[in-house]
Amino acid sequence: MKRHAWLALALSCLAIVALPSSVGAGERCAGRLVAANRYWTITYEFQSVYTYLNACDRRRPRRPLLSISSADVAGPAVALRGQLIAHSETFYDNTVFGPQVTVINPNNPRATYQLLHAPAYGNVSDIVLQDRRRIAWISCRLKLPNTRDENDPECPGGTVKRIYVVDKSSPELRPVGEGFAADEARLLATGRNIRSRSLNIDAARKIVSWREGNRMMRYRLR
């Protein structure tokens, strides 16, 4: 009995020691929670000029917070797939990029961790990510920050929404610059009845699906 009592006490002490490392990353992430999985906690915070999108490594709680975007508008449209992070950001200085969707892997050993970026064609409300080659999103007209309240939805219900997809499964990603790829997105649908939070990619069947009102719409990828 004495051996069992000591064993129980030792296991209890280990659990107490391990607890901070399992929640530390989420607690240290500054800003409002956007998304999380076993790898990342993603938050965003509004400041006077820029909007910051942050990533905290849940497996390595001592790792410093990563600022993965500091744009005029960054998020809150985010998708996670394993260690990959897809997010939207908008720069109102047209000499930069304008609105864009980016896929990154902050653990990528290369000099830059950007894997793909594409023009978003407006505010982005939803992103779905299959892998570094396939991504889809819902966007609507670009709205300047000074005409949009912080808590307003990116694409309100009555606006015209558009669904775009980048499918780079074939051919190989075309390198642009250093370490990332850019490509034109394909427009799949336009309408006022496209429902936010209905977008999905079926990896097994290679189908992008979404709802327009009560109808389920589908598009087969290459």
Image: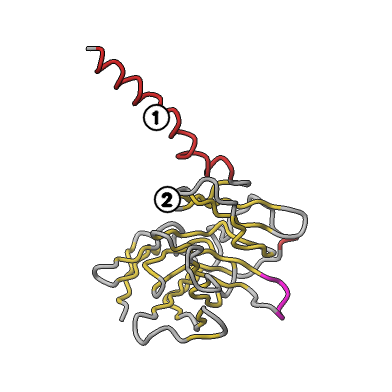
Quadrant of the image for the C terminus? bottom left
For label 2, the residue is 37
Specify few, some or many for label 2: CA neighbours under 10 Å numbering under 14, 14-19, or 20 or more. Answer: some
Q: What main secondary structure does the magenta stretch of the protein show?
A: loop
Nearer the camera: disc 1 or disc 2 = 1
Q: Is residue 12 above or below residue 124?
A: above
Q: Position of residue 180 (x, y in %)?
A: 51, 78
Which dot marks residue 85? Answer: none
Q: Is residue 197 above or below residue 94?
A: above
Residue at left 60%, top 70%? 141
The amino acid on which the numbered mark 1 sits, given as a three-letter code, is: Ala
Spot the residue most to the right: 48
The amino acid on which the numbered mark 2 sits, given as a three-letter code, is: Asn
Find out whether the residues at labels 1 and 2 contact each other: C-beta distance under 8 Å: no
Specify few, some or many for label 1: CA neighbours under 10 Å numbering under 14, 14-19, or 20 or more. Answer: few
Quadrant of the image for the N terminus? top left
Q: Earlier in the sequence, mark 1 or mark 2?
A: 1
Identify the image quadrant of residue 171.
Answer: bottom left
Residue 5 on the magenta span: no
Spot the residue most to the left: 1
Spot the residue most to the top: 1
SS for callout 2: loop
Between residue 5 and residue 186, name the one nearer to us: 5
Q: Position of residue 60 (x, y in %)?
A: 48, 49
For label 1, the residue is 15
Q: Which segment is the magenta one?
A: 91-95
Residue at left 73%, top 75%? 93
Between residue 169 and residue 146, name the one nearer to us: 169
